[in-house]
Amino acid sequence: MQKEIVSVVFSFIKPEFVSEAVKVYQKAIENKKKFKGCIDIQLFRKVNHRNEFMIVSKWKTLEEREEYLKSEFHKKVVGILKLYRQNDPIMKNFEQIMEKDNK
């Protein structure tokens, strides 16, 4: 079984910049799906905390995820979002250890 990678990023945005940050996230997600190895990506907002976000992306391999992190596109997005964030994001990578049962 090939081990897929799920990357989870938690980000806290300054309340006055939530609308701007959401626009950046939306554009980034549209483009990120074009990167080699990106299977899926979704943006979530914490219930009752409109400035706390979670991005969940699924990758074919950790190497492809790391290549994306080195890309000029990723560096540009991080630079823009840095202006809107309250603090540094928290990023964690997880590997798939079981296949889902489609029964």
Image (spheres, grey):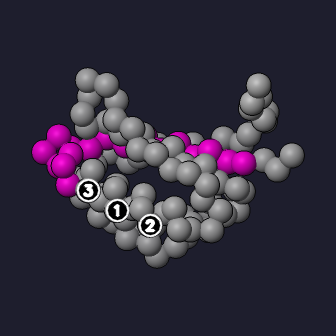
- Is label 1 in a helix, a strand or a loop? helix
Q: Residues within 10 Å of mark 1 (few under 14, many from 20)?
A: few
What numbered label is drawn on residue 31? 2
What is the three-letter code of the residue carrying label 1?
Lys
Q: Amino acid at mark 3?
A: Lys
- Residue 62: quadrant of the picture: bottom right
Q: Position of residue 42 (x, y in %)?
A: 46, 45
The range drawn in magenta is 4-20
Q: Which residue is mark 1?
A: 27
Residue 22 against residue 79 in the figure, above or below: above
**Image point (27%, 50%), residue name:** 22
Q: For the residue carrying disc 3, how many other residues have a C-alpha within 10 Å: few (<14), some (14-19), or many (20+)?
A: few
Contact flag, marks 3 and 1 (Cβ < 8 Å): yes
**Is 8 contained in the magenta span?**
yes
Marks 2,1: beta carbons within 8 A? yes
Res. 91 visible in picture? no
Magenta stretch: residue 28 in it? no
The amino acid type, in three-letter code, at marker 2 is Asn
Residue on which disc 3 sits: 23
Alpha-carbon span between mark 3 and mark 1: 6 Å
The secondary structure type at the circle numbered 2 is: helix
Determine whether label 3 and label 2 are within 8 Å by CB. no
Query: Which label is found at residue 10?
Result: none
Residue 80, position as x, y percentages in the image = 29, 64
Gap in angstroms between the C-alphas marked 3 and 2 = 13 Å
Q: Quadrant of residue 11?
A: top left
